[in-house]
């Protein structure tokens, strides 16, 4: 199965100049935890609810802080014609729960989440990805946090 058969196509996009308040409000409306960030016709980052909480609020930044100050600029992505199982394995390896989906012209065409995979492939493919994502040592691990 191809990524295009599982991905969510209706993608809401933020811009680097928008405030984190705008991003949080959009996430609340969508019941989503992530927004791709686009400048012109290029995907330049991703902003998550976690970015807003950890990189902004926890550091005392206000709601008018621009998304560009807290977004993740190094974007991992997949292509719409990639094999879904291979992408799930890659998501496990890089420990992410969602990936933007690009076409071969590198234009954003969707978002692929573990939930999307589970809905079309059943729990096995998504479950294998979750096992890899949950391994200690990833970007967001709580293992070894000094007390």
Image (spheres, rainbow, N blue to C red):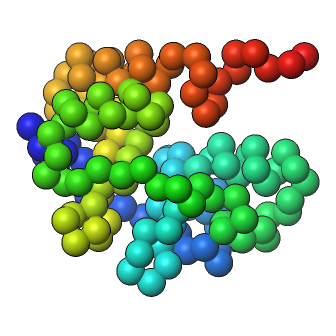
- Vertically, is 96 above or below 7? above
Q: In the visual, does 111 lie left or right of 133?
A: left
The residue lying at 55 percent from left, 74 percent from top is 15
Q: Residue at x 86, y 59 (%)?
A: 61
Q: How many marks?
A: 0
123 up-or-down from 27: above or below: above
For the N terminus, which image quadrant?
Answer: top left
Quarter of the image with the C terminus in it: top right
The residue sitting at 36% across, 52% down in the picture is: 77
Residue 21 in the image, given as x and y percentages of width and height: 71, 64
* Residue 5 shows in the view: yes
Q: Is residue 22 left or right of residue 79?
A: right
- Residue 9 position, x and y percent, is 26, 58
Looking at the image, which is closer to me, 61 or 32?
61
Residue 115 visible in image: no
Relative side of 60 to 69, left or right: right
Q: Which residue is the extreme one toward the bottom? A: 40
Q: Position of 118 compared to 38: left or right?
A: left
The image shows residue 27 at horizontal and vertical percentages of 55, 54
Q: Is residue 47 above or below residue 40?
A: above
The image shows residue 42 at horizontal and vertical percentages of: 41, 75
What residue lies at 31% left-to-right and 45% top-to-bottom? 112
Q: Is residue 108 above or below residue 133?
A: below
Q: Nearer the viewer, residue 36 or 105?
A: 105
């Amino acid at each position: 199965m191809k990524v295009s058969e599982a991905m969510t196509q209706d993608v809401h996009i933020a811009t680097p100049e928008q405030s984190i308040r705008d991003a949080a409000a959009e996430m609340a409306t969508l019941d989503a935890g992530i927004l791709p960030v686009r400048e012109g016709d290029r995907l330049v980052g991703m902003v998550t609810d976690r970015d807003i909480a950890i990189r902004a609020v926890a550091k005392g930044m206000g709601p008018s802080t621009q998304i560009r100050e807290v977004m993740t600029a190094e974007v991992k992505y997949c292509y719409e014609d990639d094999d879904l199982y291979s992408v799930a394995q890659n998501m496990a390896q890089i420990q992410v729960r969602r990936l933007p989906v690009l076409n071969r012209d590198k234009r954003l065409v969707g978002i692929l989440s573990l939930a999307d995979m589970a809905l079309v492939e059943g729990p096995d493919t998504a479950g294998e990805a979750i096992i890899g994502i949950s391994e200690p040592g990833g970007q967001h691990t709580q293992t070894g946090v000094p007390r």
